[in-house]
Image: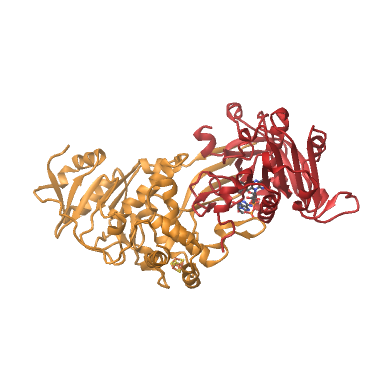
Chain colours: A red, B orange
Amino acid sequence: MSEKMLTEPCQAKIVKIKDEAPETKTFTIKYVDEALQKALHFTPGKFFMLSIFGYGEIPISISSSPLKTDSVELTIVDVGNATHALHPMKEGDIVGLRGPFGNGFPIQKFRNKDIVFVSGGCGMAPLRPAVKAIVGKRSEYKKLTLFYGCKRSDQMLFKEDLKEWSGVENFNTLFTVDEGTPDWKGEVGVVTKLFGKADLKPENSIAMIVGPPVMIHFAIIELKKIGFKEGQIYASLERLMHCGMGKCAHCNVAGTYVCTDGPVFSGAELAKLPLEEK
Amino acid sequence: MIQEKFVLKKENLHAFLEALSKDMEVFVPCHNENGATTFLPYNGQEIYTAAQTFYSPKQALNKPSEKEFFFGKKSSSVEVERVKQNGGKMIFGIRPCDTHAVKAFDKLYLEYGEVDPFYREKRDSTLLAALVCTEPCSNGFCHSMGTQEPTGHDLLMVEKADSFYIEAASSKGEELIKKHRGLLNITKFQKPELNFECKKKLDTRNLKEILDKGFFSKVWEEEGKRDLNCTSCTQVCPSCYCFLTLDKFILNTENSERFREWDSCHLQRFTKVAGNHIFRKSRESRLRQFVMHKLSYFQKNNDMMLCIGCGRCISVCPVGIDLTEIAAKIRSEFE
Ligand SMILES: Cc1cc2nc3c(=O)[nH]c(=O)nc-3n(C[C@H](O)[C@H](O)[C@H](O)COP(=O)(O)OP(=O)(O)OC[C@H]3O[C@@H](n4cnc5c(N)ncnc54)[C@H](O)[C@@H]3O)c2cc1C
Ligand code: SF4
């Protein structure tokens, strides 16, 4: 990626907006400069610093497939100033992109393995590119399992994809919600409760986890109980970031930069990081 | 190379600074409007060289608040303009230890990972005229940190009773001397050996390993309890660089500007994300971040300690928190 793409907010046009869930929209965007769009390539798990001009610049994961780079999708929850200013924006409006940043999931290394995706809430957004990339090259991977938990069923993201993935060969998709509603026929409870319902074979497996800190914490504990080794677990972390390039030091955790060394860390690396500092 | 050595007579100091100021913004050690010593652009004010300045010269390179971008909304586009640096700068009278803080910035912004063009533009046009110390300062420990000799400087100066000895230390420095040759006198004076001892000491042997082992030491809790999180230490520190970015509108929501502003790891907001989750909630965790970034973490990517031993954080702390003492306590526990 050129210095310009990484260090200066480049104009990008919103070309499509989709209501994903309450307070959550997926924005399809394209660089205004076609050359930049052509230069763009990314691994799953990478993120952009997204400028909502005048409101701020925030880290947002790419939620679309790395196999399709003529535009990118960002799935964003309205939680604060910048995200709130973004939500009413229309098709044709301009935002700024800087990046992409971060290491991403090393999915090349996961070929010929069973893959376990664990996702909580809007953690499905950063995980979706990995699922799409792996489903897109289905024959290169073995058995696939997705565990996805949300607060309520209406908050599940990417419902069409979820339906599609459940039809993919040898892909077991399991869902749960914290609060059941009359229309919800599935499981109720935390995502880790689903682990026992799938026939996981830890020996040749890799687990990828994206979700809130507590979920990551318990997912790792439960996976280890089943027999996963630290090196077979990968999780993506979230921290305050103001630059994305290891310069502003906000995401520094005991010397490790979540923006440049991460946001994806192996279980072995995570074990060494004080994730919640007393 | 110029063979001769020069002195600038003190009676010519202001003429020299004025001449320099024609070509660049010259930051000089002086008093600010509150009476604190700091570095400010030269405007004829009295120069302060009696001791280390209270504030560091870092604001010559990274201002407390600095405009980086202008965003102008057009009907179907947004103009993105990087704020240009106009003209060169000099930090006149920067102390040797503080030149090592500039070196730390250079490593971080220019060598580690992606280059930061915002800093590069500022740094490329900045000259350092180092003023060596001939006596120990109150809380400095540059001898422990190996920062008593300047680095990356363009001019080297030694203050004498009635003059400043000046020597070129780079080709840019040499050009300056040639240009202002008329204000300088040739001298036979030799730069003295710096043979004073700092009063304060910090044992740096295996310090990173020892501190990393002491991450959960009780010392953090004991010291953290007293911490007021006033952020004075991070403000006076020459190498504290943590920044946040902030967009501000100009008059209406059409045009806006993006600023980089000093932040401080001593504040809860430093790790606060949406949903009000704070990753370093306790005072001890934030004090630890400050000290560890200085004495351990920075080395991981940048191959030097971020603390350069000026001792300003110790001088300024209202409750007497002293990172050399913290390091010594943890050493005695974990060595
Ligand atoms: C690597 C990474 C990937 C992310 N991916 C997504 C995503 O795909 N979709 C999504 O909806 N959200 C994502 N987030 C979280 C998102 O960055 C925050 O929700 C957003 O910054 C909130 O900004 P705000 O101005 O609306 O909120 P405010 O609360 O008003 O935030 C003020 C400032 O705090 C910072 N901030 C607040 N919350 C966070 C946070 N959780 N993480 C980092 N900085 C924060 C930002 O600098 C922001 O400008 C991601 C965060 C990280 C670190
Ligand atoms: S260490 Fe001292 S100077 Fe620094 S924030 Fe704490 S009380 Fe203030």
Closest to the observer, B118 or B240? B240
Q: Which residue ends up furthest to the right in the rendered image? A: A182
Total marks in image: 0
Does the image show residue B77?
no
Closest to the observer, A71 or A145? A145
Residue ID at (67%, 29%): A67
Determine whether, in the image, residue B308 is placed left or right of residue A95.
left
Q: Which residue ends up furthest to the left in the rendered image? A: B188
Please state, as top left, top right, bottom left or bottom right, where the C terminus of chain A lies in the image.
bottom right
Where residue B153 sits in the image (x, y, percent)?
Answer: 28, 46
Determine whether, in the image, residue B59 is placed left or right of residue B193.
right
Which of the 4 quarters of the picture holds residue B138? Answer: bottom left
Which of the 4 quarters of the picture holds residue A111? Answer: top right
Residue ID at (65%, 52%): A81
Which of the 4 quarters of the picture holds residue B237? Answer: bottom left
Where residue A199 sits in the image (x, y, percent)?
Answer: 78, 43
**Is B288 situated above or below A45?**
below
Does the image show residue A107?
yes
Where residue B193 sits in the image (x, y, percent)?
Answer: 16, 54
Determine whether, in the image, residue B177 is placed left or right of residue B243.
left
Closest to the observer, A115 or B235? A115
**Is B323 situated above or below A96?**
below
Where residue A34 sits in the image (x, y, percent)?
Answer: 61, 27
Closest to the observer, B44 or B301? B301
